[in-house]
């Protein structure tokens, strides 16, 4: 878990501040009529956690209010498990600006915390079932919000997987079909991505995985395999690729209902969009102190 080794917020690129600016602009592209009503009297508001789960998204929340000349004092640490109702933080500043940032900040925190919570829950269930490998997310994220969602996965203890198309070369079925063969696709990819970028190949069979490994793939993904099929495929791959260094990933089909079945799976990585796609949000509110 990343939280054991440092402050996850230190990973964020400076561009996240520009993203926050864009979100604020999206929410108030014109006149702020409600802000006109309340004015700029000094005020403070309490951030209340109203549902159980892991709090995540603190640096984004902070940046919203920093850009609005407000301060945030936290009473909990990022990654802590909350029980309702928890006073998480106090925001101080001009009342107009507190209310201007309220919805943007809460939306980010609710979404990021929901992903962290789901990631932690699924990881715990897999560990309880005996799985010792890596649980990773996917690239099936919300356009424009990927940084927040990947951040939530990290806070929840999971691997965020590749961040974008440049982070790792993943050759899927359409790449293979378009290039003519797995071997050709891998060699072509290596000619441009070089030695420092991993190549992963999506495979529909153990024979395809062996072809990919022989061509120089670093990771082979067994796509949409049933649990009972993975064990046999893994045995064939390891027997056929002795002396080679590679990782085996499985993706697709993981649900909370079948988690126990995957617990004994000996693959290196299980990736699933279930920890970040369509997950519930945590409920937060920001209440002015009267």
Image: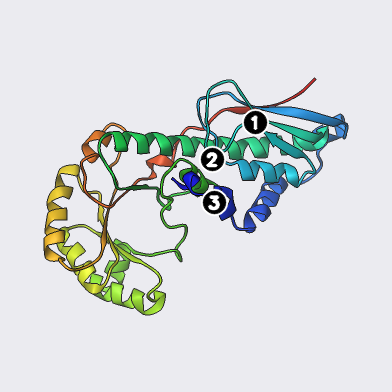
Q: Is residue 184 left or right of residue 238?
A: right
Query: Residue 228 appears in which quarter of the rendering?
Result: top left
Q: Residue furthest bottom?
A: 191
The numbered disc on residue 5 is none
Q: Looking at the image, how many numbered discs can be counted on the residues?
A: 3
Q: Is residue 192 visible?
A: yes
Q: What's the residue at 24%, 34% (across, down)? A: 260
Give the answer, above or below, for where 33 lies relative to 184.
Answer: above
Query: Circle 3 is placed at which residue position?
Result: 147
Q: Is residue 269 left or right of residue 74?
A: left
Query: Circle 2 is placed at which residue position?
Result: 112
Query: Circle 1 is placed at which residue position?
Result: 75
Q: What's the residue at 28%, 68% (across, down)? A: 217
Q: What's the residue at 15%, 60% (across, down)? A: 238
The secondary element bearing badge 3 is classed as helix
For the N terminus, the quadrant is top left
Query: Residue 70 appears in which quarter of the rendering?
Result: top right
Query: 137 or 179: which is nearer to us?
Result: 137
The secondary element bearing badge 1 is classed as loop
Image coords of residue 169 (percent x, y): 38, 66
């Amino acid at each position: 878990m990343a939280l054991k080794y440092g402050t996850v917020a230190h990973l964020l690129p400076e561009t996240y501040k520009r993203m926050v600016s864009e979100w604020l602009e999206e929410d108030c592209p014109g006149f702020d009529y409600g802000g006109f009503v309340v004015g700029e009297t000094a005020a403070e508001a309490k951030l209340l956690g109203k549902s159980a789960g892991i709090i995540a998204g603190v640096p984004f929340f902070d940046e919203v209010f920093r850009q609005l000349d407000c301060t945030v004092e936290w009473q909990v640490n990022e990654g802590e498990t909350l029980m309702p109702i928890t006073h998480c933080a106090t925001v101080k500043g001009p009342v107009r600006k507190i209310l201007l940032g309220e919805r943007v900040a809460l939306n980010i925190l609710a979404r990021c915390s929901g992903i962290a919570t789901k990631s932690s829950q699924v990881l715990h269930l897999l560990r309880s079932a005996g799985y010792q490998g890596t649980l990773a997310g996917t690239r099936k994220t919300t356009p424009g919000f990927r940084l927040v969602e990947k951040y939530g996965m990290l806070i929840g203890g999971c691997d965020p997987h590749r961040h974008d198309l440049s982070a790792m070369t993943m050759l899927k079925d359409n790449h293979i079909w378009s290039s003519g063969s797995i071997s050709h696709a891998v060699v072509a990819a290596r000619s441009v991505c070089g030695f420092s970028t991993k190549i992963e190949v999506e495979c529909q069979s153990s024979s395809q995985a062996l072809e990919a490994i022989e061509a120089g793939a670093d990771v082979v993904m067994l796509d949409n395999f049933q649990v009972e099929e993975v064990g046999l495929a893994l045995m064939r791959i390891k027997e056929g690729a002795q002396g080679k260094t590679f990782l085996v990933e499985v993706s697709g089909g993981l649900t909370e209902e079948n988690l126990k079945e995957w617990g004994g799976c000996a693959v290196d990585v299980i990736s699933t969009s279930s920890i970040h796609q369509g997950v519930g949000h945590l409920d937060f509110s920001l209440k002015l102190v009267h």
